[in-house]
Structures are given as C-alpha cells and as structure tokens.
Amino acid sequence: MAKQLTGLGGSSIENVVNQAALRAVITDSHSVKMEHLEWALDRALMGYGKSRIQDEECNRNTAYHEAGHVLVAYFTKDSDPLHKVTILPRSQSLGHTAFVPDDEGYSKTKSQLLAQMDVAMGGRVAEEFGKIFPILFYSIKN
C-alpha cells in the first residue's frame, strides 16, 4: 500500500484513511481493514465509479481494451507490475488498469518508456483485434 501512496500529500492520505473508516462503519466492521483501505485508495486514485454503460458493444470494447493493456504488460520486458484492473467505469474512463512501479525512481530508462508506450497502445490494438477475432476473446473468457 505504501508504494501506491507515493506522491500523495498528507491531506490526501488523511482523506484515504477517513474514507476507509467510513467504509468500515458502513459494512458493519469493528475495525478498519486492508480491504477498506484499498477501497478508499481506489476511490482517491481512480475516481468515483459511475453507473455502468448499458451499451453492450461499449462494454465489450472496454473489456478488450483493458485486457490488451494487461496482456501487453505481461509479455513486455521492463513494464511496471500490474496491480488492479477494472472494467467498471471510473471518473473519466470506462475502465482502468493500474500499475505499481517497483521503485519510485525519478527517471526511466529508454526501455521502460518504450514499455509504457507499448502497454498504452495495447488497449487500442486489442479493441481492433477483438472486432476481427471475437471468438479468441470469447474462448479466453470461458
């Protein structure tokens, strides 16, 4: 969790802890647990969820897109480790793939920057690939 808090100021961390405490109360928990802290941190970093888009094609494209990020990151040397993926809408996006870097270095190597670009483009490529070969994604899902 500490790696995810990198770059947040004291007031932001306080807000995460307060949100986690509220979540613990809402879920009738007697203490704040890691699941409450993770929930609150997701809200702080990725934004609040909005209602799910009812358009099935849009949902499918979002799933392809996020799966593309994950697959490219998995097979790309020097990409940041994957932390969490969601196809639930967030504040400004229809889905989100979160990475937590191994280190909090201030600079990146050329290979790391190229890996980030590959992962970013992997989402769009997967959308196109999913339109052409939907049966491959369907077989992965099932």
Image: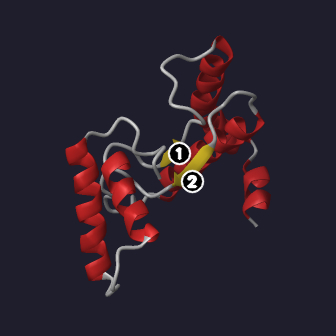
Q: Position of residue 18 (x, y in %)?
A: 23, 63
Give the residue drawn at x 31%, y 51%: 44
| Amino acid at the residue labelled 1 | Thr
Q: Choose between 123 and 135: the one closer to the eye.
A: 123
Give the residue drawn at x 20%, y 46%: 11
Q: In the shown orientation, is residue 4 left or right of residue 91? A: right
Give the residue drawn at x 36%, y 51%: 90
SS category of the residue bearing label 1 = strand
Q: In the shown orientation, is residue 107 left or right of residue 37? A: right
Dot 2 corresponds to which residue?
A: 60
- Report the mark closest to the observer, 1 or 2: 1
Q: Position of residue 77 (x, y in %)?
A: 75, 28
Q: Decide: few, some or many residues near mark 2? Use Cα within 10 Å; few <14, some 14-19, many ≥20.
A: some
| Amino acid at the residue labelled 2 | Arg
Marks 1 and 2, how far apart in space? 16 Å
Q: Earlier in the sequence, mark 1 or mark 2?
A: 2
Q: Decide: few, some or many residues near mark 1? Use Cα within 10 Å; few <14, some 14-19, many ≥20.
A: some
SS category of the residue bearing label 2 = helix
Q: Choose between 27 and 8: the one closer to the eye.
A: 8
Dot 1 corresponds to which residue?
A: 97
